[in-house]
Structure formats: C-alpha cells, structure tokens
Amino acid sequence: IPILARAQHALTEFFRLEAAAGIVLMLAAALALACANSSLAETYQAFRHLALGSQSLAWWVNDGLMAVFFLLVSLEIKREVVSGQLSSRSQLVLPVVCAAAGVALPALLYAALNHADAGAMRGWAVPTATDIAFALGVLALLGTRVPLGMKLLLSTIAVTDDLIAILIIAVFYSQGLQWPMLAGAALVTVAMWLLNQRKVTRLAPYLVLGAVLWFLVLKSGVHATLAGVVTGLLIPHVDTTNAIDDAVEHSPLETLEHALHPWVAFVILPLFAFVNAGLALGAFTAEELHAPLPLGIALGLVLGKPLGIVGAALLLRALKIARFPAGMDLRAMLGLGLLCGIGFTMSLFIAGLAFAGQPQYYNESVLGVLGASVLAALLGSAWLWLVLPRPASR
C-alpha cells in the first residue's frame, strides 16, 4: 500500500507540474508574439541577439539550455522504459504504435504538399512531434473530468514521440561531421558507461563528463543537444517499485529528474518559447499565409496527428492487441488525438535545425507550428469539453 501511495503521489505531482508548465509556456509564446508585433519589436529582436560571449542569447538557449531539456527528456524515457509505462509489452504496444502512426502520417501529408520544393522538404519532420507540457496544460483546463488513463496515454505517446524525434534529429539533421571530435565524444560516452557498469551512483562524475560530451558533440557536426540525450541514458536508475521499505537507495536518475524538472518547465522552456515564437505576422502576404510549407505543417499536426493516432488505436483494438485505457471511449480518443497535434517546442526546435540560414522557410514553419498548435488546442479542448462526462452534482 505505501508503494502504491507513493506512485500515485508521484503521478499527481508530475501531471500538476506539467500542466502548470504548459500554461506558462502558452503565456511565454503569447508574450513573444505580442512583443514582435508591437512597438517593442526592435527591443525584442535586440534581446534575442544579445551577445553573450561569442554567441547570441538565442544560440545559448537553442544549443545550450535545450541540451538540459533533452537531458530531462532522456531521463524520463529511461525511467518509463525501466520502471514506468513502457516497461511491459501490454503497456508498450498502444502508445508506441499510436506514436509511430502519429509521426508517419503528418510527415506524409507534409511531403505530399511540399515534394516539389527540395528546400522545403528539409522540414518534413517539423509536424511530427507533440508538446507534452502544452497538451497537459490544455487538459488541466478541463479539471477532474479528464480520466487518469487519458493523461497517462497522452504523456506516454508524447514521450515516445520525443524518442522518435531524437532519432530523427540524430540521423537527418547532422551535417559536416568532424570525426576526431566524434571519436572524443565516443570515449567520453564509454567512460560514462563504465561508471554505470561499476554502479557509481554519484551524479557529479556523470554531469562533468556530460558537459565535456556537450562540447565535443557541438564541435562534431552532430547537434549538441544530443549530448544531453546520451548523458541521460547513462545516469543510473534504481527501480524502487518493488521495495518493501524506504531504506532502498533512491534512484540517481529520479533525483536528477526531480531537480531539473522545475527549472526546465518554468525557466528553460518558457525562455525557449519567448526567444523562438516571436513571429512578425505583418511580414506575411496573403499568399504566404497558405503556402505549401505552413499548410503542410498545419495539416500534418491538426489532421495527420489525430488520424494516425486514432486509426492506430482502432486497428489495435479491432485486432484485440490492445484496449483503450480505462475511462476512454472512441470520442475521448479522438480528443486526445487532436491535442497531440500541439507540436510547439519540439516542432520549433526541428524547424530551427531544418531551416538554419533560410529565414523565409523558417518563418513559414514557425507560422505553421504556432497556427496549428493553437488550432489543435482549441479543437481538442472544445471536443473534450463536449464529450467528457461532467462531474456529478452534489
């Protein structure tokens, strides 16, 4: 019983923090848009390009602080695989297949609209990601009407989405590889692995080596944020779910995850949103607003995500491979699919990688991500408000 109580408390805290973070994320994005489309536009751009050493503030946020975000994502993925929602086949099938379908269909829709433009095709992965904080923030507005099974499935799909996005970034958005730096990064990775194998549980050695790894990866041609992913996967995790008492050693992974989560949720991600979501809407012509690139992103997120996720869930249920979570029917699953169309953080990040040095493509992609994320949030929340059972009146 104490173990179940601790697990329930941890889940409650996770969803509370993620929901609050999503609301802060929305406010940061709205503030960026307001600044970029007002008399503060020049001040906003000066802030983005503020020189910190040899790089701008925007660079440090996107290449430096976001490595910490990816470290946290990696920790969450490892915890889910070792002792969480992805630790057994019965729990794994539904979110993994739904996430894969929710990645493939948006990419295909985007490609269908942009296949004739080789430059635009670099952004095929932009509409493939789900922003867990943003989506849970929208769910929080519906209060106790949202079943726990829906929150768990949404968060697990989003975590699986993040894992797929990490693989996409590593394979498709690395360029100009510097092999000596990669060799150095490999040696540092082996050193962290040896620490793990020797059951070293102090966090300091891993974090110091992780910082060295970030520098080497930065200079290697692979995006520096992937150093955070590797570091997170090598932080040791002690599974305490079957512990009989509280004397079991606490997991270093969970210690670091709990320490980083508030900083990522309430500092790094809002700062990322503020730096990257400030789009000057007046710079677009009427033709550019429905150009193939932003339209492909919008259709991928708003249409491709729910169709892929709900279609996969229905197929698994028809084949009797997996069932909908408790408290969810087809209507609730459709609402979840719509909310998964909120791309935002990872979509903006991939857009920055895909269209680096191509401001027109990048601005169009930001337009598509912001428009689609807002529309998906509105459609998903409105649909769920209509179909979720209302609390019984007292």
Image: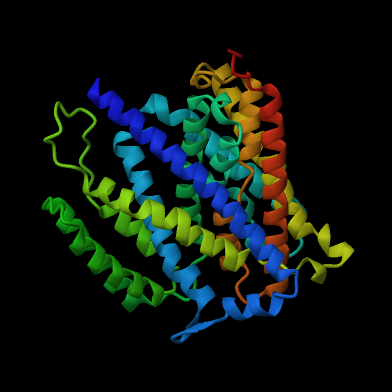
Q: Nearer the viewer, residue 358 or 116?
A: 358
The residue most toward the right is: 286
Give the residue drawn at x 66%, y 46%. 106
Colour scheme: rainbow
Q: How many labels does the image show?
A: 0
Residue 339, compared with residue 6, is above or below; it is below
Quadrant in the picture for the N terminus: top left
Q: Nearer the viewer, residue 380 or 109?
A: 380
Q: Which of 383 and 173 is in front in this view?
A: 383
Give the residue drawn at x 54%, y 26%. 144
How far from the left and from the top, in percent, is residue 103?
58, 44
| Observer able to see residue 2 | yes
How far from the left and from the top, in percent, is residue 255?
26, 49
Give the residue drawn at x 40%, y 57%. 263
Give the residue drawn at x 17%, y 29%. 243
The residue most toward the front is: 394
Q: Quadrant of residue 25?
A: bottom right
Left or right for 166, reference 296 = left
Quadrant in the picture for the C terminus: top right
Left or right for 103, reference 70 = right
How far from the left and from the top, in percent, is residue 114?
74, 58
Residue 360, compared with residue 339, is above or below; it is below
Left or right for 134, reference 266 = right
| Observer able to see residue 161 | no
How far from the left and from the top, in percent, is residue 250?
19, 42
Residue 329, compared with residue 249, is above or below; it is above
Q: In which quarter of the image is residue 251?
A: top left
